[in-house]
Image: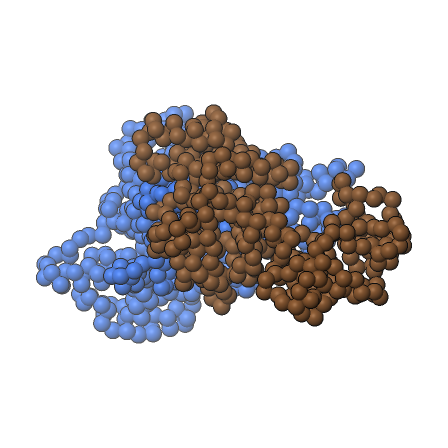
Amino acid sequence: MKVKADQRVSWALATPVLALLLWSVVYPNVTIIAGSFAHGLGYWRDFANSPSDREALWTTLVVSVGSVIGAAAVGLPLAFVLSRVDFRGRRFLQAVATLPAALPPLVGVIAFLFLYGESGVVTRAVQRALHLSEPPWRLTGIWAIIFVHAYTMYVYVFLFVSAGLERLDGTLDEAAAGLGASTAFRLRKVTLPLVTPALAGSMLLVFMSALGSFSAPYIFGGGLRVLSTQIVASKLNGAMGMAYVETTVLAITAIAALLLLRWFERRRSYAVTGKGSNTRISLRGPMARLAPFLAASLVFVLVLPHAMIVLVAFARDGAWTTQVLPPEYTLDNFKRLATDPQLWLPVRNSISMAALATALNIVVCFVAAYLLVRRRFAGRGLLQLLVVLPWAIPATAIAIGLASTFDRSAPAQLRVLLVGTFWILPLAYFVRGIPLVTSAVESSLRQMDPSLEDAARGLGASWLLAMRRVVIPAARPGLAAGATLAAITAVGEFVASIVLYTHANRPISMEILAQLRNLSFGTAAAYSVLLILIVLLITVAARLLGGRPERVETIPTA
Amino acid sequence: MAGAARLSLDKLTRRFRDKLAVDALSLEIASGELVALMGASGSGKTTTLRMVAGYEPPDSGRVWLEGKDITARAPRVRGFGMVFQHYALFPHMTVGQNVAFGLEARGVSKAERSARAATALANVDLDGASPRAIQSLSGGEQQRVALARALVIEPPVLLLDEPLSNLDPNLRRSTRNELRATLRRLGLTALFVTHDQEDAFAVADRVALMENGRLLQVGAPEELHDNPVSRSVAEFIGRATFVPGDYDGKSVTVHVAGTATTLAARAPSTLGPERNVLAVLRPDALAFVKNGSGWPGVVTDRRFAGTQLVYRVRVDSETEVELQSTDRDVREGDKVSVRVVREPVSVVAT
């Protein structure tokens, strides 16, 4: 009897969640794939014969591989130095090193423009110092994109490898030393092989991010084509069939990378035991004095983009022409945002759309995570697939799918007209948030002793009471962490927004772009500062609401 | 330093923040000797071992190996193969690669490496295990691989950190016998850390008992049991009832059950004739007597412990003694008579 009742609860929960995910995640993708075959193989043949598409595909792959190399070149040594070498300020630096990830993608790209662009501060400073008549470099083309990607995406490598190093059983290194192995031999034979899975995982993550990246190629690409920008261009030109093929190709490449990533993650589990200390090298002599200096310069480089955004936000629009630094400073940019209703509208839009999407994420993803962790039912495998899918599929592809599925009302086909309305963007943000929130809640629920829920039921609690008093409190840290990520992503979202926005519901990112086109750098930077403040506010609020941040590992101590 | 000692710890001291983890500890280990560092957790035994291995620098004191001061040497130069509590086997290498690791680090040729690794594995009864994955080994096998990996580099002194604590009780008994047999057969000098007195007694020639960073007593297992230098040692080693008494230099007079009983006594050299001492009554030194000549008492607890039973007997309002007996017929609540049947008993300061 009880088993049957349990199954009914599972199904009562699973049916609406599965239906919603099939409708919002799978249906749009099916529309795209079906659309790409609307003329049989015609569009595919066009794609294969189009030099610009072949170039886009090739460039996308080159950019992605280049980004992986660049991110690893920065992130790997940084992770090793900051986790293995002991010096004052090491922990502070570890925190600072993750800063680039806190910049909304578009804001990061703009900061680079202000710094290293043709009329950027660093570019002009170098030009002045060397008395050049031309800027020493142009931040455009493939190198520029890889440079920006390496700067923002090394954080993945840094975090994964650092975590791998921290997780590493310190006694392994001690054992190797006790057996007579030198530092270099230990690094090569013990440490590196053990962090290889973490490194490979993070590199694939960079690959996937670079694959779907839109902001950097869009702003710095110059004439360069990559798949994501090509898709948007095809749509703007009304070549929907072509856009469908391009989207399918991009999505398939991304999903292939995801499968590879999963494979690596499964290999990544060496049991961690032992109470050995993590052996950190203490610096002595001249190196000890050099290290803080190197560290400080690193902080400077990493903080520069943030600082630049703030600086420009206080610059008077139009006054900054050929000087290295903006010559005049003012509060006008912020005053205008606060007083001009037209300028304030995007802020309101972004906040309300992000709030809406996140609220829906919290409800749907909690149920999905609960089902995945605590329930066995037919359809569990499908649910598992549906919640990671939006993570693998680049945002541009998600947006194109939504745009071509919900562009008309056709109740028989389950189509609702959302394009051109307020609702399309929150829906897109919701879809992008699904994997973030679900996986965070899942990891929280997995840490919960499974017998707790049974114990509560055994003590006479109804299913709802057990949920309210036991399961939801256990999920709270994950809910807070996941919702934070989803809200942060949504409030600064750019890639899906550029495909789906209308003038009335334009988000902050689109307004930043518009202001940049107007050469109103100060206003664009003021919006960016506001965006960073909102992100900070969300993070702090979630910390206060969700209690302690996630601790993913539980290491049994003998 | 002293000539005969293979390894010499000279006033080793280590402080963690405010806590003195190891306090001026000195210990000498002769060539071919197996010494156990025993103590409760937090007594400083692992820190001592780590200072010997070179993983932990001492705040003061020295470590001598065969007359050379090695205090400043890095672990890899000391080359004491260490067997870790959780074995610290490299999870990404096979059994053979693990065992050969120390040789590889020394640049030994591949052929010689695999030959010597095979010998080392044979020494721990793991012939042919070389190609196996670490994850496929049982706990006992992992322990032996860890031992083989340490043995293959022919360490001057083998260090073992709780080598048996991760094994279940049955396996633990057989493994500790094998461990002693292997170490003996190869004529090794070894220092090992344990919190378990059965492990220490079964494997070691001498046991160094630690508490709060200091050595309480060093000696053969029987010596620690029969001649404890202090109440702490007597409490840690075996079970005992402490009865207050007066010591006159040869015998101790205890007042139990309203009568004064004089027993032949053995005291540590530091203890002279003194009124207030504690007599250490071991459970095996006490017995039931039928004729009523002993201390009258009531059985308060009866516990079956295999070949023997352990009884607790209340002999007066302040004293409850524990005794071992093969007599199975005594029940809880029975009125019995108890006396000391094995003398001398040891006395310690209060």
Q: Position of residue A543 (x, y in %)?
A: 52, 62
Residue occupying image coordinates x 11% and y 60%: A130
Q: Where is A359 relative to A142, above or below?
A: below
Residue occupying image coordinates x 12% and y 56%: A134
Residue occupying image coordinates x 84% and y 56%: B294
Q: Chain A: what color? A: blue
User: In the rendered view, does A289 fall on the left or right side of A438?
Assistant: left
Q: Where is A288 relative to B175, above or below?
A: below
Q: Quadrant of the C terminus of chain B?
A: bottom right
Q: Chain B: what color? A: brown
Q: Position of residue A200 (x, y in %)?
A: 39, 40
Total count of labels: 0
Q: Nearer the viewer, residue B100 or A519?
A: B100
Q: Where is B329 relative to B260, above or below?
A: above
> Can residue A350 be seen in this snapshot?
no
Q: Where is B114 relative to A264, above or below?
A: above
Q: Position of residue B10 (x, y in %)?
A: 43, 58
Q: Quadrant of the N terminus of chain B?
A: bottom left
Q: Position of residue A462 (x, y in %)?
A: 76, 50
Residue occupying image coordinates x 41% and y 35%: B152
